[in-house]
Amino acid sequence: MATDKLFSVAGISKLNGEYKVRFANDIMRIKVLAKSGHEDIRLADLEQDVSKLEAARIILAMEDFADATAQATITEYLEDNAPKAKTAPKTAVKAPVKVKAKAVKATAKVTEDEDAPF
């Protein structure tokens, strides 16, 4: 995440048919969203100032956001913005090299012994 800002209000709203998670520091943000054409504006006052990810986790558990649309919107936000686990740098794996075996001529001398069992 690009910012360390803290927020005391979080929720969802619908603009042009698309739901998004919204963050603010004042519940009066509802007026600005409504004036901008947002619909189904649902904001909740959080008990303390928290980061965006923490705010999203908090409202995910709230009863006001228990419907399928709100749950899907918040869950998608969390999946898209959750910190990614660092992975080890990938090293190029070379394909196995095929080696042709060289044929070797047998050079052993064969002698017939009369005492040999076979």
Image (spheres, helix red, strand yellow):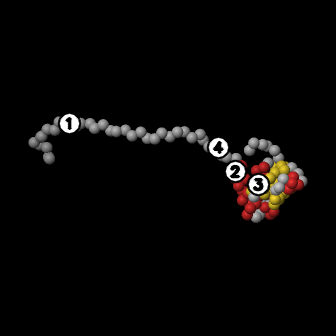
Residue visible at 74% across and 56% down in the picture: 18
Q: Picture quarter containing residue 2? A: top right
| SS category of the residue bearing label 2 | helix
Q: Earlier in the sequence, mark 1 or mark 3?
A: 3
Secondary structure of the residue carrying tag 4 is loop
Instruction: State the residue at coordinates (84%, 53%).
Output: 36
Q: Depth-wise, is mark 1 or mark 4 nearer the camera? A: 4
Q: Determine the CA span between mark 2 and mark 3.
A: 12 Å
Classify mark 3: helix, strand or loop.
strand
Q: Which residue is mark 1?
A: 108
Label 2, label 4: how far apart the Cα atoms are: 16 Å
Residue type of the residue flagged with mark 1: Ala
The residue mark sitting in front, 2 or 3, is 3
Tags 1 and 3 in contact by the CB under 8 Å rule?
A: no
Q: Earlier in the sequence, mark 4 or mark 3?
A: 3
Q: Amino acid at mark 3?
A: Lys
Sequence-first disc among 2 and 3: 3
Question: Which of the numbered marks, if any, corresponds to residue 80?
Answer: 2
Residue identifier under label 3: 20
Q: Residues within 10 Å of mark 1 (few under 14, many from 20)?
A: few
The residue drawn where x is 50% and y is 40% is: 93
User: Does residue 104 appear anywhere in the picture?
Assistant: yes
Q: Amino acid at mark 2?
A: Asp
Q: Quadrant of residue 110?
A: top left
Residue 42 shown left or right of residue 76 in the figure = right
Separation of disc 4 and disc 3 at Cα? 27 Å
